[in-house]
Amino acid sequence: MDLRIFTEPQQGATYDTLLTVAKATEDLGFDAFFRSDHYLRMGNVDGLPGPTDAWITLAGLARETKRIRLGTLMTAGTFRLPGVLAVQVAQVDQMSGGRVELGLGAGWFEDEHKAYGIPFPKEKFARLEEQLAVVTGLWETKVGDTFDFHGTYYDLTDSPALPKPAQDRIPVLIGGHGATRTPKLAARYASEFNIPFASIEDSVRQFGRVRAAAEEAGRSADDLTYSNALVVCVGRDDQEVARRAAAIGREVDELKANGLAGSPAEVVEKIGRYAAIGSQRIYLQILDLADLDHLELLSTQVQSQLS
């Protein structure tokens, strides 16, 4: 079971804060540092000092880390033209020495689009399908050849399809709860399928849909990695769990029901239940980025038992 650290910087974080967490992620032996791609806070927080851009952040971290994988859950397809996104991600992959992964989704948070003047089209999923075709098509085009794409929303002619990533194939993550279109899209384009904030029962159903879609598309279902993203709140005792829950504005019972919360032993047991239904990777959503002791506890008391 791989454990990855997943952050939500729109809730309030500077680049320096993210760098500190990323370096701790690396030093403590976690597999990867991922971040959301949002421009507006959610819930009852001030979001200060304001949002940071996902790919600018990851470019900086690419130069200041050495081992961990770096990526997004999920880059919003509404934020960037796919040709530009392909250039950005390929460049950050080069800057990192081949450690980048791209989670790409349709985009859903209308308020952040209104706040920053970003168009919020109705036909987001159809656009996402074309975006995936363009981004992966550009990367897969051989040097010296050109790439053309003529879709409903995007039109590329005689693209040199440069630059190329450092990796032969950048892993693409697709995720969500959609019952039909999402599994088909994952079967076609994804290296990994991620279901966010889902119960074990819902994960079983969605993994099954993706596996069936892959087989139907002529692809082995085992070609994909299956993962979950879950909020985490661990403490050495009940008081520490309660303190950490209060710091992120959540209730302990709710966190235990919907995420990974409690003692290290409780969290290890629940992760084991996800592993039993085929989850191979957990993205641990860390909401209090100032609490580095939390990361250390996860490393020494949870990750150590799983490895």
Image: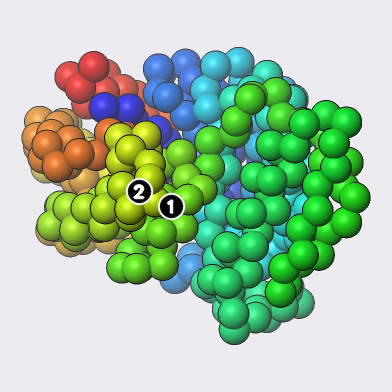
Residue for badge 2 = 214
| Amino acid type assigned to the residue bearing label 2 in the image | Ala
Q: Work out whether 63 lies above or below 241.
A: above
Q: Which mark is residue 186?
A: 1
Say whether residue 2 is left or right of residue 288.
left
Looking at the rendered structure, the secondary structure element under dot 2 is: helix
Note whether residue 51 is visible.
no
* The C terminus sits in image quarter: top left
Q: Quadrant of the N terminus?
A: top left
Where residue 23 appears, x then y in whole percent?
54, 23
Left of 230 or right of it: where is 144? right
Note whether residue 131 is visible: yes
- Say whether disc 2 or disc 1 marks the residue closer to the N-terminus: 1
The x and y percentages for residue 63 are: 72, 23
| Residue 235 screen position, x and y as percent | 20, 36
| Residue plotted at (39% across, 51% down) | 217
| Residue in the picture at 38% in, 45% down | 218
The span from disc 2 to disc 1 (Cα, nearest Å) is 8 Å
The amino acid type of the residue labelled 1 equals Ala
Q: Residues within 10 Å of mark 2 (few under 14, many from 20)?
A: many
Percent position (x, y) of residue 306? 20, 22
Tag nearer the camera, 2 or 1: 2
Q: Tell me which residue sits at (13%, 57%) in the image.
A: 201
Q: Are marks 2 and 1 in contact (CB under 8 Å)?
A: yes
Q: Is residue 131 above or below residue 95?
A: below
Seen in the image, is 300 located left or right of residue 174? Answer: left
The residue lying toward the viewer, choosing from 24 and 293, is 24
